[in-house]
Image (spheres, rainbow, N blue to C red):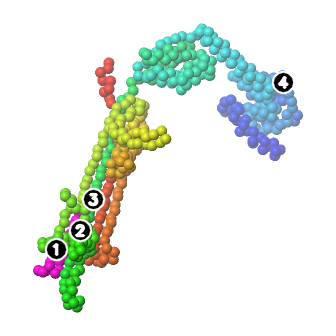
Amino acid sequence: MVVLFFLLLLMIPLLCFSQSGKRTSSASKVSFDFMDADVRNVVRILAEVSGKNIIISDAVKGKITMKLDNIFWDEALDLVVETGGLRKIEADNVIRVVTIKEFEDEIKRKIGERESFRKDRLERQRMGEEFVTETVYLSYVSPGDMDKMLKGGEGTGAPGSQKKGFVSEFGTITQVSWNNALIIKDTRENVANMVRIVREHDTKPNQIQIDCKIVQATTNFSRELGIQWGARSDQTSSLLGNKEVMISGGRSFSSATEGGTGTLVSTTNLLGFRSGGYIIPYNVNLPAAVGAGSGGTLGFYIGSATDAFQLDVQLSALEDEGRGRILSNPKVITSDNKKAIIQQGKSIPYKTYSQSGTQTQFAEAVLGLEVTPSVTKDGFIKLEILAKKDQADFVNTSEGVPTIDKKQASTLLYVKDGETAVIGGIYEREEGSSENGIPGLKNIPLLGWLFKKQTKLDDRTELLIFITPRIIKNVYKNEG
């Protein structure tokens, strides 16, 4: 009994799925207790209880033992059918109980009848009994695109192949490119359906203007502080037998004669010249990069009346600050779902060397915009965008050929008609500082400025890309 109870619990969900409809509140409940009862007799009893018309196949045989208490009659029938290895077929108010073999044979027979009917219908179509031909002229869609859509994405299909899209097995579509038309041959019903579909989709495409702004802002700042100074002392020392003692910056002879005379030059490559022909080599030579139009210097000189002591000092300073902005504004108009490309730039030649010889090739440095727009039903515009700004860098070259500074952004986004979106930004900042001087002495507080040069650099670059799509409303304003 316990085994039978759990068996019923497992079978009830399966039996519920096999019911053809919802059970009504008036369905009868039954209780049974049979042992080795004939299956045919059990099914007949259920027919009497349910009031249904039940037909039992002659091949249905066997015995069944069952005990059911207060269940619906249709559940009891399902249990009897499943337990006896049978199948039931419901049609209107009649239930047929057959064996599994009879059930499978009937399914095969019905499939064969449908296949025979289909083949007979295809044969009639092939013989042209039901076919009509119609020419459909297109205004905005190409024949190739419309042909592909009607065939379900396939370019061609052999007659008699499995049906795809809207064309029947033996239907044909012929493209007429010179007058933008399609010749459709198919059954009257299919032709009418395809003509309706063509009219629905051969519509005026939206025209979209893409306005792109590429803004590049730069800020440059540099500062240099330098110093040059030289001291000269020329004295006669009694301790050395009235010998001349001179202290100055480093110097050497550039030329000499047998008499011991010659020309002095500074080892630091810079001399201070004063009246009387005196030369003062600099002890410290760390100037800022001043020149015409940049920076400035401040110098002062201290000397004795007899020129026994001389001091020449020059302070130099340079500060450079600049700001710039480059605005690039490519615009392009295209149709819905059609890629548009606009670009402007230079082709930079360079040479390559191989076994076949020297060849000249070109590298592209362009400002370009590639975009494919698609208008959605809710007024948004889907954009597939590639915006790039390639620029030749003539400061950094390789064998005389400038390098290419590349900046680009590629994205997919949805933008409301007429609104602006920022699709990318690149921020660069280069900071640097350097200090040149005499080791040890340059680190002395305050006095260290007499022995060092300081340089500071701060460069900033920012790139922003703005996109504004607009649906053009008046492209067809002169029509109808």
Callout 1 crowding tier (Cα within 10 Å): few <14, some 14–19, many ≥20: few
| Residue placed under numbered mark 2 in the picture | 270
**Label 2: element kind:** loop
Tag 2 near tag 4, CB within 8 Å: no
Q: Which disc number belongs to residue 378?
A: none
Callout 3 crowding tier (Cα within 10 Å): few <14, some 14–19, many ≥20: some
Disc 1 to disc 4, how far (Cα)?
A: 138 Å
Which of the 4 quarters of the picture holds residue 310?
bottom left
Tag 1 near tag 4, CB within 8 Å: no
Mark 1 belongs to which amino acid? Tyr
Report the magenta residues as a range. 302-318
Residue at 18 percent of width and 76 percent of height: 311
Q: Is residue 468 visible?
A: no
Q: Which disc number belongs to residue 221?
A: 3
Residue at 71 percent of width and 32 percent of height: 18
Q: Earlier in the sequence, mark 3 or mark 4?
A: 4
Q: Earlier in the sequence, mark 3 or mark 2?
A: 3
Disc 3 to disc 2, how far (Cα)?
A: 29 Å
Eye-nearest disc, 2 or 1:
1
Residue at 38 percent of width and 49 percent of height: 398
| Residue placed under numbered mark 1 in the picture | 278
Eye-nearest disc, 3 or 2:
2
Eye-nearest disc, 1 or 3:
1
| On-image quarter of the C terminus | top left
Disc 1 to disc 3, how far (Cα)?
A: 40 Å
**Label 4: element kind:** loop
Q: Is residue 238 above or below residue 200?
A: below
Mark 2 belongs to which amino acid? Leu
Q: Which disc number belongs to residue 59?
A: 4
Q: Earlier in the sequence, mark 1 or mark 4?
A: 4
